[in-house]
Image (cartoon, rainbow, N blue to C red):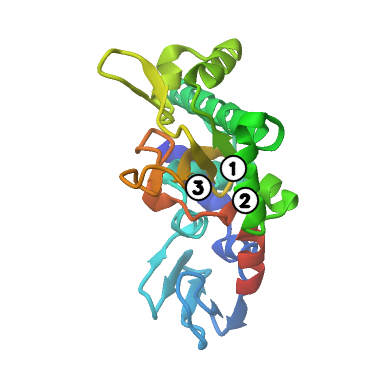
Amino acid sequence: MENQVEEIKKKLDIVNVISKFITLKKRGRTHMACCPFHQEKTPSFTVSPELQIFKCFGCGKSGDVFTFIQEFEKIDFREALEITAKMAGVTLIRSSNYNQEESHKKRLFSLNFEIAKFFHYILLTHPLGKNCFDYLKNRGLSIKTIKEFVLGFAPDKDDLILNYLKKKNFTENEINNSGCFSKSQYGRTYNRFKNRLIFPLFNHRGDICGFSGRVLPGADKNQAKYINSPETEIYHKSDLVYGLNLSKDAVRESRA
């Protein structure tokens, strides 16, 4: 792995890589721009082609090409390594443990996709979702917005979603690890978001990491107005910005 990191570094020029994300202007031996990591009017973000590093003298962020990708895209080192490897034309050598972990995460993302699809169908098509749909309609949300954010409704009947997921060949263990379900003291699996308006939580790549659920008018006042998925292997609340998957291109253009 260390050899491949060095190979990628040697094949990439940090100026060319960062220029794919923000507009740099050459000033002497360095390149400069307004920092993409904090708001500023006078450029203090510098990139050195000689040292192959960047540094912002305003907020203090600095590092190499991997660090920039991590910070800009809000991803971990491994994901940054994959992105830069593609840029450099390097095929990464992965361990069997890595492949198993990635396969497991893909299953969880696929499971969350099916959960969101089911709740979305209930909201738009099924009589069980009519009250929730009417609530959104009265709040002024259009069908386009509902579809764009894949909003849904979680019905009270747990068997509907559980049977659907089992028909999609997801195991009970996978279902319980999704964060959308909990176990009762009697061992029964139940949907923790039942009778709530559902907001799927996407990462910047458009994968569904978790869910947020809102109670509808008339619900028991002792209930929390909003609840989120618990932390899972793919859902970390502090890492997500709601709607970033839809707005990241506009944000990137505004920084150019």
Taking depth in this image into account, of 107 and 215 the one nearest to the observer is: 215
Pinpoint residue 177: horizontal percent, then vertical percent: 39, 24
**For the residue carrying disc 1, how many other residues have a C-alpha within 10 Å: few (<14), some (14-19), or many (20+)?**
many
* Residue that appears at 43% across and 46% down: 76
Q: Secondary structure at mark 2?
A: helix
Q: Earlier in the sequence, mark 1 or mark 3?
A: 3
Pinpoint residue 73: horizontal percent, then vertical percent: 52, 55
- Asked if the residue at tag 2 contacts the one at tag 1, i.e. Cβ–Cβ closer than 8 Å, the answer is yes
**For the residue carrying disc 3, how many other residues have a C-alpha within 10 Å: few (<14), some (14-19), or many (20+)?**
many
Q: Secondary structure at mark 1?
A: helix
* Residue that appears at 51% across and 88% down: 42
| Mark carried by residue 175 | none
Work out whether 90 lies above or below 52.
above
Can you identify the residue that label 1 sits on?
132
Mark 2 or 3, closer to the camera: 2
Taking depth in this image into account, of 156 and 49 the one nearest to the observer is: 156
Mark 2 belongs to which amino acid? Answer: Leu
Pinpoint residue 12: horizontal percent, then vertical percent: 58, 54
Residue ranking furthest to the front: 218
| Mark carried by residue 136 | 2
Q: Relative to residue 46, is residue 129 drawn left or right?
A: right
Mark 1 belongs to which amino acid? Answer: Cys
* Residue that appears at 30% across and 20% down: 184
Residue 97 visible in rendering: no
Q: Earlier in the sequence, mark 2 or mark 3?
A: 3
Taking depth in this image into account, of 218 and 71 the one nearest to the observer is: 218
Can you identify the residue that label 3 sits on?
80
Q: Relative to residue 108, is residue 150 drawn left or right?
A: right
Residue 21, image quadrant: bottom right
- Give the distance between the C-alpha atoms of the residues marked 1 and 2, in whole angstroms: 6 Å
Mark 3 belongs to which amino acid? Answer: Ala
